Image (tube, rainbow, N blue to C red):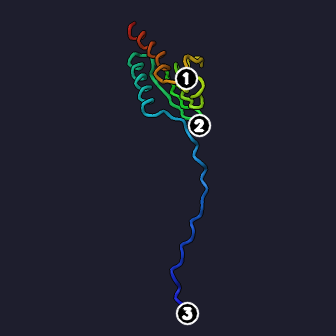
Amino acid sequence: MEPEGPSRPAEPAVIPFPRPVLQVAFDRAELMRILDLYGRMVAAGQWRDYAMDFGKDAASFSAFKRSAERPQARIEKRPSLRGKQGMWALYGEAGQVLKRGHELANVLSVLERRLVKAVEN
């Protein structure tokens, strides 16, 4: 009888995993800019709560006066519109588009003007 050599380990079973769903998200600088504005609006008494939603088509930041209501403002990043009217959009309480653009700072300027008025009063 011949001594048996080392046996080969069994091949691992291949378990198919579904491909991860790609998400649109805010990068660090964008989120810092949005949260900075949120903090100033909270200090002015305009906003009290926020929510973020990340989907495969868009990421959104919604700001609320009270959490049980509709958002007073919604900032949306939709990269598929980058080459058209711009990937940034600001929506009002009724869902109307207040501003669209290619730069976040330009879109947020509408809310920053409101903040200046709220502080002056």
Residue annotated with mark 2? 56
Identify the amino acid type marked 1: Ala
Q: Closest to the observer: 15 or 30? A: 30
Residue annotated with mark 1? 89
Q: Is residue 73 visible?
A: yes
Quadrant containing the N terminus is: bottom right
Q: Closest to the observer: 97 or 86? A: 86
Where is residue 49? Give x, y as percent.
46, 25
Inter-mark Cα distance, 3 to 1: 79 Å
Q: Residue at x 48, y 15 (%)?
A: 110
Other residues around mark 2 within 10 Å, as few (<14) / some (14–19) / many (≥20): few
Q: Is residue 74 above or below residue 15?
A: above
Q: Are marks 3 and 2 in contact (CB under 8 Å)?
A: no
Where is residue 83? Give x, y as percent.
58, 28
Other residues around mark 3 within 10 Å, as few (<14) / some (14–19) / many (≥20): few
Q: Which mark is residue 1?
A: 3
**Residue sitting at the far top:** 121
User: In the image, is 59 to the left or to the right of 33?
Assistant: right
Q: Earlier in the sequence, mark 3 or mark 1?
A: 3
Q: Is residue 115 above or below residue 86?
A: above
Quadrant containing the C terminus is: top left
User: In the image, is 78 to the left or to the right of 117?
Assistant: right
Q: Residue at x 52, y 19 (%)?
A: 72
Identify the amino acid type marked 2: Lys
User: Which element carries disc 1, helix, strand or loop?
Assistant: strand
Q: Residue at x 39, y 20 (%)?
A: 40
Other residues around mark 1 within 10 Å, as few (<14) / some (14–19) / many (≥20): many
Q: Earlier in the sequence, mark 2 or mark 1?
A: 2
User: Which element carries disc 2, helix, strand or loop?
Assistant: loop
